[in-house]
Image (cartoon, helix red, strand yellow):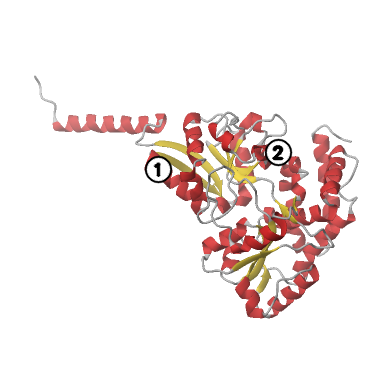
Amino acid sequence: MKKMSVKKLAVILCLCLLLLIFGMAVYGFSGSDTITAMIQQSRYYNGLQAMIEKLKVEENITIDVQVIPDMEFLNMLRMKLNAGEAPDLIDYNIPAVYDIVDPAKNFADLSGEEWVGRLLFPEHVTCREDGKIYGFPFLGVPGVHGFIYNREVFAQVGADVPQTWEELLAVCEKIREAGITPIYMPRDSWVAQALMSDNFARVLGTEGAQEYADRLKSGEARWTDRPELAAVIDTYLELYKKGYVNQNFSTASYDDTIKAVAEGEAAMHFNGDFFAASVLEENPEADIGMFVLSMNGGADTATANMSSPGFVVYRNTRNMELVKKVLGLWSTPAYASLYFKDRPGFPAFEGIDGGRIPSYLAEIKEKYIEKDKVIPEWNYYVMDLNALFESTLYIYYTDAPTRENMDGADILEKFQNDFEQYRKDQGNSG
């Protein structure tokens, strides 16, 4: 028998190795199961990372994470869905995403999963259109809105927590004179809108908000019909005109905002209570508080974001069973409790340790949550318009401070034109 040369044997072995590598790449053969996920940069929390790492160590399941800047996330999601190249898991607010992207067309129906039976408030994540559940939530009671502030900065300048908007402006002036930024705002358009959504709900009231939203969507009312909404925007713009907002607001990032409040470079920021948790992740030694304040005579209530951070599953994933297994594991105490280890909150599932209520939420809980004085933010009543808001109105809010002659009435008039075109495109010209 003729012996094979060493050189020829080496060539054959190299070819075999190349074929093996090619097979692994094409058919997904590897030492572990892998799925893909797309997550917003501001929500790639330490607890979520711990859950992902636990999967890898204990279940040999790897999640290939693509972290996307918040401002780019929605456009990136739409492009990937349109191209049929979406990741297996998609991070977004549940159920808000149902009104931005057609859930029946794009996401997997999870209604029959075992963990659905352990949801404390399944109605919070149920699609109004068809009664199905397309999203996996982390929170049962989503966060409330308010001013998150650095107590050390307030103490440094001798400022008390304001009880009225006029007192807030006085505190801002005192902080500014001390050379510290009173209120820090980033360029991210989803951030600025929270202050408007919060106060629109207060000045309209719960019943008034629902009635006005219905009339807007039916074409019976215009966005310019309620001058109190324009007044809310003007009050927001006044903060910029008086120099109470960081000068680099048009370029600052959300991460910059977290760091500024955490390190005492800025005194305050308006957002959901999740922002306070992010500040404490950045600086565990920071002394952080939170207060609720109405502008323009709005009701003494707190508002809440009625959507929970969570995930939807791409309907055409090739890894459906593996993804469902991951969600099943994430709903258990061993995994879900990790999510709340550094960010205490109100879990979506029974039997989960949400952690000790942090000090910044204790007063809010006593004054508003326990007294049933929490109402939905304005966005809740017009949730099906979120896609339109993202591309127009929210951007107007962030651009307006750079335009001297643009006020609240101008913004709403401009948006009314967008809204009318949107209704025409939807076949509802009114």
**Residue 60, how many percent across, how many down?**
38, 39
Dividing the picture into quadrants, the one containing residue 280 is bottom right
Q: Which mark is residue 99?
A: 2
Element assignment for label 2: helix
CA neighbours of label 2 inside 10 A, class few (<14), some (14 to 19), many (20+): some
Q: In this orientation, which residue lies closer to the viewer: 29 or 109?
A: 109
Q: Which residue is mark 1?
A: 56
CA neighbours of label 1 inside 10 A, class few (<14), some (14 to 19), many (20+): some
Question: Badges 1 and 2: C-beta atoms under 8 Å apart?
Answer: no
Residue type, label 2 = Asp
In the rendered image, the quadrant that contains the C terminus is top right
Q: In this orientation, which residue lies closer to the viewer: 235 or 345?
A: 345
Q: In this orientation, which residue lies closer to the viewer: 422 or 200?
A: 200
Sequence-first disc among 1 and 2: 1
Residue shown at 54% from the left, 38% from the top: 89
**Residue 201, how many percent across, how many down?**
79, 52
